Amino acid sequence: MSAEPAEAEAARFRDDWAGLLAAGHGAAVHPGILHRLVARTAGLLHRARREDPFEVHFAEQAGALLVDAHFTDPAVLARAIALLHRQPDGNGRGPAVCGAFAAGWAAALRERTLREQEAIRTAADSARKEAEKALRASEARFRALFESAAIGIGIGDTEGNILAVNKALQEIFGAGPEDLQGHKVNELVHPEDTPGVWEAYEDLVSGKREYLQFDKPYYRRDGEVVWTQLTVSLIRDDDGAPQYQVAMLEDITDRYRLQERLRHQATHDSLTGLPNRAAFFERLEKIFEEPEPGARFGLCYVDLDGFKVVNDSLGHETGDQLLTAVADRLKAALTPLGHLVARLGGDEFVVLLENCRGEQEAVAAAKTVLNALDGPVHIGDHRLAVGASVGVLERRVATTTPGAAVRAADLTLYRAKEAGRGRWTLFDPKETARAVSRYAVSVRMPAALDRGEFFIDYQPLHALADGSLAAVEALVRWRHPQLGVLGPDEFVATAEETGLIMPLGRWVLEQACGQAADWERRFGAAAPQMNVNLAVRQARNAGLVGDVGRILQTTGLNPSRLQLEITESTVVGPEDEALKTLHKLVDMGVSLAIDDFGTGWSNLAYLRDLPVSGLKIAGSFVGDLHDPRKDEPTGWRIVSGLVSLAHTLGLTVTAEGVETRGDADRLRAIGCDWAQGWHFGRPVRPAEIARRIAEGGPPR
């Protein structure tokens, strides 16, 4: 937009804004004061709409300035919001500016009300003390203040009995004195009471606190709900013992409903009324905050087939009606099942299954989606066939992150489209990792090392016998500028296929050994062993021995502090050249361990031929022990057998994926040596590992 139209738009808004304030105040305002107020607030709102980055305090300050100028009538706020909604909005800030303006107005009004409340409370307390000294004269003054106050006031004793209520409080409840006096405070419970309100009340009447303040709903006598801002203060006697409680209630129902409307607008799609992208991610992220061990969830990522054709041929209005009809069908079919249906944008929808019971339930939800859309949609004279493709993801919460889960479901959706549309496709971790990796590697990875986009987190491994920190595993991460932080499963496989694993693996080894050497210098014998994963291509490279020797010499790390983890597929037979490389590494003093044992063919003969000193049981073994579809006793017998076999061969055994204390205790009982997993700690930055070394190991 050119400068001139922007100035014209700002001028028109100032004129409309001036007219609104001149007509909506309800009392005479000096023209000079009004002119300055208009200029100041219009300027702030214009800055909130146009300046980058978006600064919410400009709109909030504009709302507060109106309250300071005595524009406190809710009708003024409503007209102001309506005017702001009508302004051209090319950058999508309209709802945010309206919300911030209303929040600033409400906060300023609340602050003003609190000052009035405090004055009333102070006056009430002073009046009470004077009443005890001067009896009737002071009582008359207190009674006048009590009865004429515009805010609802109630007085009760410390047993919770309501002793007196003023007229304003009776009007709030739509009740007479007899409906309140003589009743108990705790009879005024509402299902939507703020958590902790009654615990705080008990602390107050027992003298543990002086006052409390909450936004609290009440039922009126007619059954309607009234929202109030409740402030309860404790009045003590001359000896300091609790004697009375004074409650002051302001009716904030209109303000509360306005805030609820604004919040609904911010979290729901304006076209379909479904929760929007922000609401979906908020709900999804809550699942990951404090998950129960073994907790699962599911996602059905839905994209309509052929929607672009409808938009292009029949117009966007018809397309919008089709989206609304689809949303109604999905909501009617899936909401009764307890699933969240949200619109992410365009013709993309998502179904969230909390506490999912397994893949079968997620697949059933996907089938429900397809069944709900199986049938034409009638829009005007058109009879439109609508279909969809669905990507289905069902995972344990502990195995992924919200962002990674959505990316995986989205990629699974496109596999469904590639397979012919009108169908559901189940998440395949190998296919998803391959798809993400191909894209990331082809676009960014060749120069990512030079840009410093890779970093290493370290996951602790603890000795089960005494809980001490025995080792850490170096896990490379990629801070991709478009895809966010990627784990090794999302790019290492493709890096190995393309050969880029060689410079990346060398860099990881250099960083990890340098970090291990630093810990060794700082903490001596308490420093943990450093475990570094070795890719198959690395292990079969003739230059590996030279690289490891050079890195150990450069960093000064004792070779005995380094353990390289290899997979079962690294060596394919006793004549494999990789076997010679591994023996040379062991001759240097470096130890070797087999990673993820049990996920491949697990040729036990290789354990006899390989120069390894450790064995890591794949995390899926421990994770499957909590799968209700699998036999837990049999699973533990398998794990116990692996531990016994490894010990027979003189190998140290590490269990991966240990998430609970119970699993740790049982692994300790069957003789497992080390363990790693969320129970002992997630991958963390080097500083956190250093803190743990200094403080000693975490709980066993």
Image (cartoon, rainbow, N blue to C red):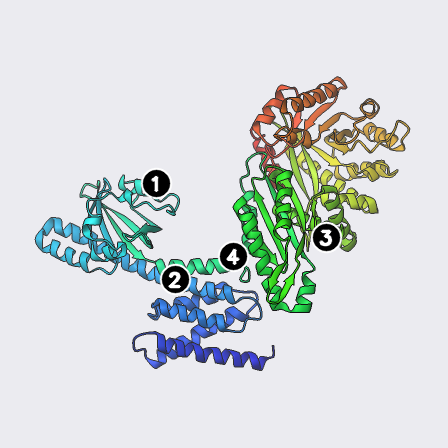
* Mark 4 → mark 1, Cα distance in angstroms: 31 Å
* Mark 1 → mark 2, Cα distance in angstroms: 27 Å
Quarter holding the N terminus is: bottom right
* Mark 1 → mark 3, Cα distance in angstroms: 55 Å
Disc 4 versus disc 1: nearer the observer: 4
Closer to the N terminus: mark 1 or mark 3?
Answer: 1
- Disc marking residue 106: 2
SS under mark 2: helix
Closer to the N terminus: mark 4 or mark 1?
Answer: 1
SS under mark 4: helix
Disc 3 versus disc 2: nearer the observer: 3
The answer to whether residue 305 is above or below residue 290 is below
Closer to the N terminus: mark 3 or mark 4?
Answer: 4
Residue carrying label 1: 199
Residue carrying label 4: 267
Quarter holding the C terminus is: top right
Q: Nearer the viewer, residue 18 or 75?
A: 75
